[in-house]
Amino acid sequence: MPEGDTVWRACQRLNAALAGHRLTRTEFRVPALATTDLAGVGVREVASRGKHQLFRFDNGCTLHSHFRMDGSWRIYRRGQKWTGGPAFQIRGILSSEEYDVVGYELPVLELLPTDEEASVVGHLGPDLLGSDWDLDEALRRLRQQPARTIGEALLDQRNLAGIGTFYRAELLFLQGIHPRRPVAEVSDLPRLVNRAKQLLFANRWRVEQSTTGNLRSAARAYVFERAGQPCRRCGTRIRTEEFGPATQERRSYWCPRCQPAPTAST
């Protein structure tokens, strides 16, 4: 699933293409919006909120979308061939005089009043790349469940919005914290959260997410998707497992030496 920096960058590009322009054509290939026509409506802005995309229009409505695992918005110059996938995967088309913006495999696409956006994103915690970022509020939310593992808590978008499995794994490695350590036992939680913001900020304009400083495909990560390979710091084999609530298990990676597991006494 795309993480917060990827969604932020996508919305920046969408905003540059559409904001300040009127739509000349729209088409929505989802049942709830099949008869909706926004031609002639102006686009105020396209903004991200965590992993959500919000297209705000001058008629007081917002188009809400979410990529989840496979969705994407592609931008094409008018007349340019669309190359995002077969036509049956298209869920939405927003055209201006200059661009066609085409949404592929979007699992979430809905229209709602802009003043009711809280109904779809109001549950989210502070956005690591958003204007609403509030470190104290993020820490307050994380500390509400002190016995919860830090690995689960970081992925919960209700605590802070934008972290996915890549940044979870890399962040915990960089801070030397095992993903199963309880939140209450993380010695410097503010530093951990600030590091998360720094990582997303550093990668926000790059397609290649990297925490090592190396943009080569095999060298961008310390532990993520490196199970069985030697740790870049100590040489110990990286381990992996899936854990979390039964319906939300996500794969985690860590170095057993650099990130020692919590003991039964802690």
Image (spheres, rainbow, N blue to C red):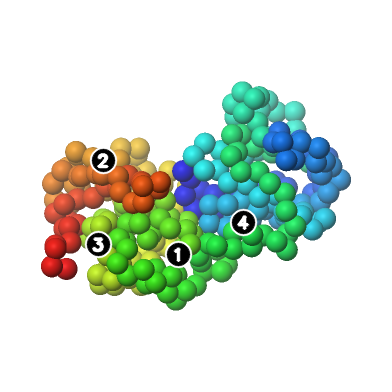
Whether pointer 4 and pointer 2 mark residues with C-beta atoms closer than 8 Å, the reply is: no
Q: Position of residue 115 (x, y in %)?
A: 73, 63
In space, the residues marked 3 and 1 are separated at their CA atoms by 17 Å
Disc 2 marks which residue?
226
Whether pointer 4 and pointer 1 mark residues with C-beta atoms closer than 8 Å, the reply is: no
The extreme front residue here reads 246
Circle 4 crowding by C-alpha within 10 Å: few under 14, some 14–19, many from 20? few
For marks 1 and 2 on the same chain, the one whose residue lies earlier in the sequence: 1
| Mark seen at residue 159 | 1
In space, the residues marked 4 and 1 are separated at their CA atoms by 16 Å
Q: Position of residue 90 (x, y in %)?
A: 65, 31
For marks 3 and 2 on the same chain, the one whose residue lies earlier in the sequence: 3
Which sits in the foreground, 244 or 105?
244
Q: Secondary structure at mark 3?
A: loop
In space, the residues marked 1 and 2 are separated at their CA atoms by 27 Å
In the figure, is residue 63 to the left or right of 231?
A: right
| Mark seen at residue 181 | 3
The residue shown at (36%, 64%) is 195
Residue 44: quarter of image: bottom right
In the figure, is residue 252 to the left or right of 125?
A: left
